Amino acid sequence: NNAVAKLSFDTSAEDAAAVVSELSTLLTSGRISPKNKELIIDTYTSKLPDKAAALRIAQQLIVSTPEFHSFDTVKSTGETRESASTPPPSGVPYKAVIFLMLQGGADSFNMLVPHTCSPKDLYSEYKKVRGAVSMPLSSLLEIDASSSNQACTSFGMHPKLATAKQLYDDGDLVWFANAGVLTRPTNKDKYKSHTKAALFAHNSMKLYIQRLDPFKTDVETGALGRIADALQKQQNLSVEKYNLYKGSYSLDGHYGPEPFIVDGNGVPKFNEAPSDEGMDGVIKNLNGATEFDSGVFADLFSNLFVNSIDANKKLTDALDQTANTTAIFGTDSMGTAFNMVARLIATRELRGVDRDFFFIPHSNWDAHNKLEWNLNTNLADLDNAINAFSTEMKTEGLWDSTTIIQASDFGRSLKPNGGGGTDHAWGGNYMMIGGAVSGGKIVGKYPEVLTDDGPEIIERGRIIPTLSWDEIIAPIAEWTGVSHVSVKDVCPNIDNFPESQRIKASDLFVDLTG
């Protein structure tokens, strides 16, 4: 028996005060304050004689009260709650960081491939180990690596990365070779005891890449969130954070506004179809200022609620006032995400921000089969999005102010499986892109032996990373303005890696001012 039921409410009371009192008893155990009850009664009465409309708006207003969302008693002053104002311009040059997460584990050893190597022919070894999933040498987009201290003087990028290859040649893209989740340098004998993360698993690896804090030195915060915290505490900068499509761990922090969640169309307007044209004003009055001895949890709810309403309006108004992008973005999820990021960056002055942090997730990189199709499809979307976004930023004069860091859950096994794909592994190759990036090089160390004899190769062709995410995020933090001494608050494992081997921010960025 699949009976379907729904809750409903009806009342025989005719008097508005009696109806609201009955609803207050049902929904808040009668805790609604006299002033809030009066506001709801007045709104109910204004809808009569349409009793259904009156009852609907009364219920909507009650569930927006602090009494409904806490067990506190509210003592209202009758005054409007003060909302956050748009910060004045600080004069600090604007910067934005975009964290692009390729979810599922991108096969990055087919994104960056050995090409011309001497004295050892590393491409032939790559082809032998990768077998049926290897990339043909003739298909690769050759890039110069002669100044990168690698085993090869040139590498090949996947043929679908034509824009990325041009950005590398232009000095706006750097590759990080064999990077991954590490809390300290390790080797074949000790990696299991040295590693806190549950290796090769999507959930744990994504979590640790975004948080960089497996030992929970700063509980429930993410790497970008800690950068934002440091900028707000140290320099009093105005910072905003945006998740595309859904929440992330990376942007979690302790200070400032909570991250927005937006999609390709922006953020839905609060109460887009109100039951009364003055409804939003009534809601803000229901969550107005309170006496000093009013309930603290109710006050916290009202403060967050009113600030969220105001922030929503500020953002929707800013997007409405800003012209659409001129570059041609794709209609796929990657294209629409980067289009929205470009539009949000264009609103920076209206929002009064000095720093923006964006997190873009992109799914379907878990290629246990059909690896060739997977990369051809996904990398085409990625390259098109980067092309449109870089074009837009250059048109707006903001390319030097924007840095994209691309990551993934993990690299994939060098050895193919039986289904035309590859499996979960560890170390991988990742890109950083932007006008301020000192690119045209490969940072880190691409493995020089890809067979099982290699010092970094473990079971099934998995590779132990030799470059940690702490070492990548630290210079990005410095580029945004975090002081060198405070970087370890952002990257808690950084002191476990020899300082002499760490990447200097000046090696990755052409300009560290601002």
Image (cartoon, rainbow, N blue to C red):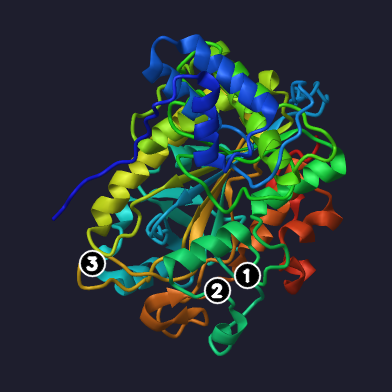
Q: How many marks?
A: 3
Residue at 72% over, 48% down: 227
Q: Which residue is mark 2?
A: 197
* Image quadrant where one finds the C terminus: top right
Whether residue 106 is visible to the viewer of this picture, yes or no, is yes
Distance from disc 1 to disc 2, alpha carbons, whole Å, reads 7 Å
Judge by depth and name the residue closer to the eye, 53 or 221: 53
510 horizontally vs 271: left or right: right
Which amino acid, mark 1?
A: Pro
Give, as a three-letter code, the residue at label 3: Ala
Pointer 2: residues within 10 angstroms few (<14), some, or many (20+)? many
**Residue at disc 2, secondary structure:** loop
Quadrant of the image containing the N terminus: bottom left
Residue 53 rendering spot, x and y as whole percentages:
40, 17
Q: Which residue is mark 3?
A: 132
Please identify the quarter of the rendering in which residue 124 is found.
bottom left
Return the residue nearer the eye: 251 or 119: 251
x then y, percent, for residue 261? 52, 37
Q: Residue at x 50, y 68 (%)?
A: 204
What residue is at 46 percent from the left and 11 percent from the top? Answer: 47
Whether pointer 1 and pointer 2 mark residues with C-beta atoms closer than 8 Å, the reply is yes
Tag shown at residue 214: 1
Q: Residue 84 at what x, y percent from top left?
A: 75, 27
Assess whether mark 1 and mark 3 are in contact (beta carbons under 8 angstroms): no
- Which callout, 3 or 1, points at the residue further toward the start of the chain? 3
Residue 119's label in the rendered image is none
